[in-house]
Image: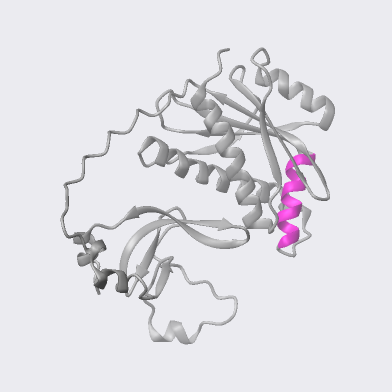
């Protein structure tokens, strides 16, 4: 099978997003590496080898509504997904093994949601990727191994198969030429002075209005539902004005925002309180 560049992007990007999700959930980032399993090996053959070494493999499939109808298949032996789940549960102070499968599914869903956002930016479209457990490995497709380790030991390998024929996104349109501007603000001394002015910047995850009676009932552990879903962008606010939107990321243990959209002047005026 001839290697597919878009499929390779999916494999490497999911691997990176998986490491990020594990870091955010367990507080420690594993070292993960994605390598091809060879063009002459099918996912079923790769699954048989993992079964011999690590036990039964549990499969998950995730469809992406993109050209070529790509589907990602993640296969994990029990000692792999149970170890990942145990690290997340341990970080939360939970020692209940019965929650391991649900915790592993949550890890998969979060990593696939991050992959869908990355693919949406790459293909310039909104992507909703439905996922579900699969009975077995696909008969064909590009096969990858995702191997990883923590400082205290290695993780059993995961299998990643990609079926369909994903195609690369079309090249972006060339940027329009900017008009020549004379006497721009950047050349004025007043503008240089303004560059040193500090402004308060905040990030809004959402808001909600509650009756006073409900506010008085709030206590430690109460949950407040906001008006924004987890996959919607957060708002970057300066002086009570929304200037940008983006996604929350984790950088060296700190939360940050990756900017996806800068508001136009008209949009900023419309969002003024």
Look at 24% across and 62% down and name the residue there.
187
Q: Is residue 235 above or below residue 169?
A: below
Task: Give whichever of 116, 174 is nearer the camera.
Answer: 174
Decide whether the magenta segment is chiefly helix, strand or loop. Answer: helix
Q: Position of residue 98 (x, y in %)?
A: 75, 52
The percent position of residue 188, horizontal first and vertical second, equals 23, 67
The quarter of the picture where residue 212 lies is bottom left
In the image, residue 155 lies at what x, y percent?
78, 41
Relative to the observer, which residue lies in front, 39 or 53?
A: 39
Q: Nearer the viewer, residue 201 or 66?
A: 201
The quadrant of the image that shows the N terminus is top right
Q: Is residue 85 magenta?
A: yes
Which colour style is shown? Answer: one colour
Q: Residue at x 60, y 42 (%)?
A: 16
Residue at image position (20%, 60%) is: 184
Tell me what residue is drawn at x 26 percent, y 39 percent: 175
Name the side, left or right, on which 119 lies relative to 75: left
């Amino acid at each position: 099978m001839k290697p597919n560049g878009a499929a390779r992007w999916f494999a490497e990007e999911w691997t990176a997003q998986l490491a990020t999700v594990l870091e955010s959930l367990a507080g420690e980032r594993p070292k993960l590496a994605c390598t091809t399993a060879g063009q002459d090996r099918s996912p079923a053959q790769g699954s048989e080898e993992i079964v011999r070494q690590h036990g039964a493999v549990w499969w998950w499939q995730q469809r992406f509504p993109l050209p070529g109808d790509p589907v990602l298949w993640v296969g994990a032996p029990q000692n792999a997904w149970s170890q990942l789940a145990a690290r997340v549960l341990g970080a939360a102070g939970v020692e209940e093994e019965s929650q391991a499968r649900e915790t592993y599914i949550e890890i998969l869903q979060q990593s696939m949601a991050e992959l869908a956002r990355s693919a949406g930016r790459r293909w310039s479209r909104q992507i909703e990727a439905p996922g579900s457990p699969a009975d077995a490995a696909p008969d064909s497709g590009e096969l990858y191994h995702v191997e990883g380790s923590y400082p205290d030991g290695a993780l059993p390998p995961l299998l990643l198969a990609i079926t369909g024929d994903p195609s690369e996104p079309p090249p972006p349109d060339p940027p329009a030429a900017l008009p020549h501007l004379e006497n721009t603000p950047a050349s004025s001394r007043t503008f240089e002075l303004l560059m040193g002015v500090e402004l308060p910047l905040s990030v809004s995850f959402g808001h909600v209005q509650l009756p006073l009676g409900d506010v008085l009932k709030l206590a430690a552990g109460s949950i407040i539902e906001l008006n924004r879903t987890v996959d919607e962008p957060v708002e970057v606010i300066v002086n009570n004005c929304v200037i940008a939107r983006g996604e929350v990321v984790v950088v060296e243990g700190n939360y940050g925002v990756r900017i996806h959209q800068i508001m136009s002047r008209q949009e900023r005026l419309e969002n003024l309180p």
